[in-house]
């Protein structure tokens, strides 16, 4: 290019191009149109339509507005890119500026900028339901379903809903909570499976489901052996033992087995039959007693035993055992068993013998006494039954037995409420009350209830929580009056206990005198007001002195 031509081209770019660009509102850099994209999308920022590409020496992209910040890829090229961030339902706007550097002939350098707005729109991703792992539990136990691992990637879970879809019907404690419970029922030896479906719904209304299975195993209950009542028979008669009233609550009785455990030996017709027979032997005039033990075995191989006595009489009549009436007593009380009404029609009772045959093991004071005692243990809300068998033997060695049942009922001990320590807090601060140290010695705490009983009214975050919070009122509003709160806790048996706690609201300036500028100003003003009379007096004295000096000068003239 000739020097003259180069000069005129440079003059055009130097003088006329900026003037034209300004007068025509001409933008040389072009960041591309504004965009609306979905969160998670790949976004392309395109500056390739910037003017005079032949003279462009550099591109530079940067984010100048909006939140959150994103990472730009290829920010020094005409086309930068980034991943649109995940946003909430309100979305977000991001602003990007493109700076384009130009280099014109004769070394003239020129830069121009343009912006592009990217509106990132919310895409509601569905929640993920998690009904928890499958469970294997025993019958008559409390089962907790657990949906707490359900999640939502953006707007959160709004509701939970449990529904039983298989198995014998059971009642959930609350089908709309994260962790409902139910009581596993009694089942047979093969067990039962229950299936529950959890549906979670997010704030945007999207749903997800999951299922969990609870296998309730058959906890094989043992059989109950019943060897039949004691009998009084004559010698040389056929006697029938009867175990047919033995029973099993679930899988049934598989076998019977009789065994003689006391008295002259006799031969049973079939020791494995439910009702075997034998021939009562010849006895002396005092007679004799024969004792037989029956063992029954269920299908699950659990066993139970019972005994029966057969008194073969000569002239001696057998005694009559009387273990006393059944009793209903409280836990942690002393119980007296009473065999004193047992009797014998002729030669009298020689001995007593008590034996516990059912219930949690306990210790009798003297199992060979007429009236032994024992201490009932602590029991749960369902209570406990104890069964005791009394055997009496007369002088002629004939025997008789009887049983007595002692039902021990639960005594619900009340809870102990603990509203926490008293507090002193600053005005407008968040205060947390703490009742978490409340306790119940037996059945547990079912509910908490907080109530304000004095002071400026406040609003609890949740008055049924064990640790509710509230905002302390301003010092002026509280009037320097303490806030008093009462906590009532209720156990599962309905018993209640209360406790209170006091919250005092503090003012910073009141408790830290001289800490504010206002206090300093007031002190200064007070000091100045005290000085006013003194200054006035000084001015009056000075004025008097000036007057005296002036008069003396006048008279001298």
Image (cartoon, grey):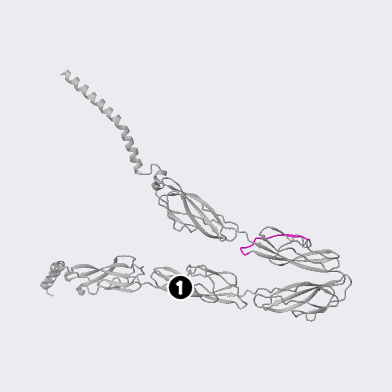
Decide which of 492, 71 is in the foreground and name it.
492
Q: Residue at x 77, y 79 (%)?
A: 276
- Residue 24 lies in quadrant: bottom left
Residue that sits furthest to the front in the current view:
345
Segment colored magenta: 370-382
Vertical side of 239 occupied by 470: above or below: above
What secondary structure is found at the residue carrying circle 1? strand
Decide which of 24, 204 is in the foreground and name it.
204
Left or right side of 166 for 15: left
Where residue 71 sits in the image (x, y, percent)?
34, 69
Name the residue that disc number 1 marks: 199
Q: Residue at x 44, y 58 (%)?
A: 461
Residue that sits furthest to the right in the current view:
284
Left or right side of 327 for 205: left
The quadrant the N terminus occupies is bottom left
Q: Residue at x 80, y 81 (%)?
A: 269
Is any atom of residue 81 visible in this view?
no
Q: Is residue 374 magenta?
A: yes
Please name the predominant secondary structure of the magenta segment in the image. Answer: loop
Left or right side of 554 for 213: right
- Residue 42 lies in quadrant: bottom left
Q: Is residue 282 magenta?
A: no
The quadrant the C terminus occupies is top left
């Amino acid at each position: 290019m000739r020097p003259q031509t180069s000069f005129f081209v440079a003059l055009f770019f130097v003088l006329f191009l900026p003037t034209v660009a300004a007068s025509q509102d001409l933008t040389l850099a072009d960041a591309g149109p504004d965009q609306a994209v979905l969160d998670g999308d790949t976004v392309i920022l395109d500056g390739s339509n910037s003017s005079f590409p032949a003279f462009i020496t550099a591109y530079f992209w940067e984010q100048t507005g909006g939140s959150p910040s994103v990472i730009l890829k290829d920010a020094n090229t005409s086309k930068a890119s980034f991943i649109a961030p995940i946003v909430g339902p309100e979305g977000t706007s991001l602003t990007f500026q493109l700076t384009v550097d130009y280099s014109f002939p004769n070394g003239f350098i020129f830069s121009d900028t343009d912006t592009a707005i990217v509106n990132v729109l919310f895409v509601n991703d569905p929640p993920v339901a998690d009904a928890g792992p499958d469970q294997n539990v025993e019958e008559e136990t409390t089962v907790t379903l657990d949906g707490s691992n359900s999640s939502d990637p953006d707007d959160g879970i709004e509701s939970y809903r449990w529904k039983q879809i298989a198995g014998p019907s059971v009642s959930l404690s609350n089908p709309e909570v994260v962790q409902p419970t139910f009581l596993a029922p009694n089942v047979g030896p093969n067990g039962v499976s229950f299936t529950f479906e959890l549906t979670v719904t997010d704030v945007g209304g999207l749903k997800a489901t999951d299922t969990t299975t609870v296998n309730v195993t058959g906890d094989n209950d043992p059989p109950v052996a019943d060897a039949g009542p004691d009998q009084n028979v004559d010698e040389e008669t056929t006697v029938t033992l009867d175990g047919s009233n033995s029973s099993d609550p679930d899988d049934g009785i598989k076998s019977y087995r009789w065994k003689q455990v006391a008295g002259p030996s006799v031969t049973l017709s079939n020791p494995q039959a439910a009702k075997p027979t034998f021939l009562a032997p010849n006895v002396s005039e005092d007679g004799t007693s024969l004792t037989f033990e029956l063992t029954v075995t269920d299908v699950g191989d659990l066993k139970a035993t019972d005994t029966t006595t057969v008194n073969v009489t000569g002239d001696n009549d057998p005694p009559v055992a009387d273990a006393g009436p059944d009793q209903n007593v409280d836990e942690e009380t002393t119980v007296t068993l009473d065999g004193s009404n047992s009797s014998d029609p002729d030669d009298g009772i020689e001995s007593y013998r008590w034996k516990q045959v059912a219930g949690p093991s306990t210790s009798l004071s003297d199992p060979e006494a007429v009236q032994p005692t024992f201490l009932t243990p602590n029991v749960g809300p369902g209570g406990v039954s104890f069964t005791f068998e009394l055997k009496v033997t007369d002088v002629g060695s004939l025997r008789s037995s009887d049983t007595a049942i002692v039902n021990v009922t639960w005594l619900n001990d009340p809870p102990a409420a603990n509203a926490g320590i008293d507090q002193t807090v600053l005005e407008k601060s968040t205060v947390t009350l703490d009742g978490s140290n409340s306790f119940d010695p037996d059945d547990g705490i079912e509910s908490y209830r907080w109530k304000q009983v004095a002071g400026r009214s406040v609003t609890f975050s949740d008055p049924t929580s064990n640790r509710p919070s509230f905002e302390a009122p301003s010092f002026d509003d509280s009037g320097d009056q303490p806030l008093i709160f009462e906590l009532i806790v209720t156990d599962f048996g309905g018993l209640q206990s209360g406790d209170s706690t006091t919250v005092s609201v503090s003012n910073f300036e009141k408790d830290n005198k001289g800490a504010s500028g206002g206090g300093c100003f007031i002190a200064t003003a007070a000091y100045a007001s005290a000085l006013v009379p003194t200054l006035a007096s000084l001015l009056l004295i000075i004025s008097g002195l000036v007057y005296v000096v002036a008069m003396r000068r006048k008279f001298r003239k």
